[in-house]
Amino acid sequence: MINKEVEKILLKVQKPGRYVGGEMNSVVKNKDDVDVRFAFCFPDTYEIGMSHLGMKILYSIFNNVPYIWCERVFAPWLDMEELMLERNIPLFALESGEPITDFDFIGFTLQYELSFTNVLNMLKLADIPIKSADRKELKQIVVAGGPCACNPEPLTDFIDIFFIGEGEEVDLEVIELYRKCKAENKSKDEFLREAAQIKGVYVPSLYDVEYNDDGTINSFTPKDNAPAVVEKRLMLNMDESYYPENFVVPNIEIVHDRAVSEIFRGCIRGCRFCQAGFLYRPVREKSVDVIDKQCHTICNNTGYDEVSLSSLSSSDYTEIVKLLEKLTSWSSGEKVNISLPSLRVDGFSEDILNKLKTVRKSGLTFAPEAGTQRLRDAINKNVQEDELIETCSKAFNGGWNKVKLYFMIGLPTETYDDVEGIAHLSQKVVDTFYRCENKPKGKGVTVTISTASFVPKPFTPFQWYAQNSREELMDKQLHLKDTITTKKVNYNYHDADTSYIEAVFARGDRKLNKVMEKALEKGFRFDGWNDCFSFEGWMELFEECGIDPDFYACRQRSFDEILPWDFLDYGVTKEFLIKECEKAYKNTTTEHCRLKCNNCGAAKYGGGVCFERR
């Protein structure tokens, strides 16, 4: 339902389809028939938010409950924001077209640290007080979850409740508690104290933090009976976890414009830089029949002709060949493409290749992460160079001529020899194409390499590591560029400036709240976009607030320092992470979870890969 005031300005913005709603499968309810209205806010544009699987799942879960109406809200782009401010139009939800000012819950998903400014800007655009302490009534409860909630401290002044871990169950438990407290005329403070007793709920106002003279944390103290440690929530049985039969079909083209099916959560590998691989332990798979049914149903109900199998490492699904056989039994006849992202070099078998040949070809993507074997061992990638070459050879002989390779710059223990190794490895892939007897006739090869700057993240073995300085990262990027000698290799690299700010907030503490507030005053938003990001602006902001960003990004921490996120329990013990960090400096690898249990701590959940027979 289009807001009448919004309708007047739609022809003045670049993409009106972002703001009109009314998409197929969107849910519209009578607001008088519901007890709780939930604004699900994605702190980025419509095209990015509508591509996000977690939002699709939670949107459907909430709306399946008769007394909840969940509506979608996205950050308006600059042109729309300017007109909204000019016409006094507050931020609105797509389903009803109504301002979210009086909604019961304002929920954000935190996928990327550089979207934090959008969280505050969206609250401001909605005419909602940005600080939790200024929202006194039992309404406008601002909640947040997602991977960046694993270090919630830079946002603690603004968020009432953080959901720790997977949200399918804990979100509904909190909403039900809210409904009960609302019916009993309880205060917001009473509601928050009760909510803090729910596993997976962190209420930052119920904790006090004291600091040492050097700026590190001295103590983290709960009050009002809040738990000393907040333990994550997770879905153990993935076959029984909720999965929607419908997705909202967007009105305009989005970033990932296809159906998505989650095949498992977690990762067996233990790459030491990878936050997701530790946050989502243990690995829990869906069965072939369940995945097949969900894929077919989603395609039938949305009209999509492509379905992507979502996971951290698709080829690690134990029955991947059987799954592909089942999917292609109907997908090829119905002209549906099966997409397998996140393939590992050592998991690309002839069987997988043959199944992929039956659908339309796109480029293949692999992530060696490092250019030399020594560094791949240090980060526990457990991929050998000959495996990459063999995999590329299979692909080229199978008809492919485009390969994308992802690497990281600035990894712990990295040297300039490791950087040059990226160029040398890429050249070997090019040479492999021309050695293949069955390569595509009349075509050349294109190898695209992309490097991201390493960002040390919480709950990884590298959480203590000092990030390379901006100057070091940029110098390594240019060195790699100069080392590439063939036009068959295209090189893309991620901006080192944004990676630096990302590291500041990834490992930040509560002192960064004042930086966030000042950023809002100065109009910072969409910092993940080149159009809006200003490194100089951020540096001026830190200086104005008396904050040294190097303290968070480029400082090596000791193992005995209290980290801002130490009170959260994601199932992996600090002792295990320390042991893995020490092994990295010895270039020593750790076997993956299906070969050997390494006692990371995740077995305490009583399910998943920890209890499979090896």
Image: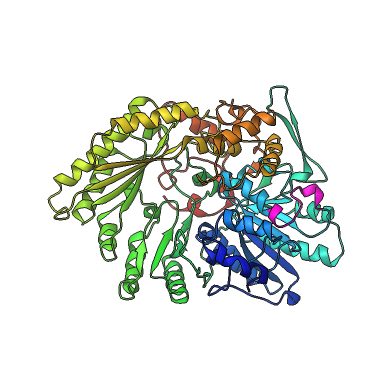
Residue 497 position in % (x across, y down): 50, 35
Task: Return the residue found at the far top.
Answer: 213
Q: What x and y, as percent, mark residue 95?
A: 63, 70
Q: Give the percent coordinates (x, y) of residue 271.
A: 44, 40
Q: Is residue 131 left or right of residue 439?
A: right
Identify the residue at horizontal 66%, vertical 47% (top origin). 231
Magenta part of the chain: 123-135
Task: Give the mark count.
Answer: 0
Q: Position of residue 260 (x, y in %)?
A: 45, 63
Residue 509 lies left or right of residue 392; in this view the side is right
Look at the picture and state if 69 lies above or below 559: below
Question: In front here: 357 or 554?
Answer: 554
Q: Quadrant of the N terminus?
A: bottom right
Q: Nearer the viewer, residue 4 or 515?
A: 4
Is residue 420 toward the left or the right of residue 462 in the image? Answer: left
- At 82% from the left and 55% from the top, the residue drawn is 188
Quarter-of-image position of residue 503: top right
Q: Is residue 411 left or right of residue 144?
A: left
Query: Does residue 240 appear in the picture of this structure?
Result: no
> Can residue 258 be seen in this snapshot?
yes
Where 104 falls versus 390 (above or below)?
A: below
Q: State yes or no: residue 133 in magenta.
A: yes
**Residue 116 versus residue 358 in the image, above or below:** above
Colour scheme of the picture: rainbow
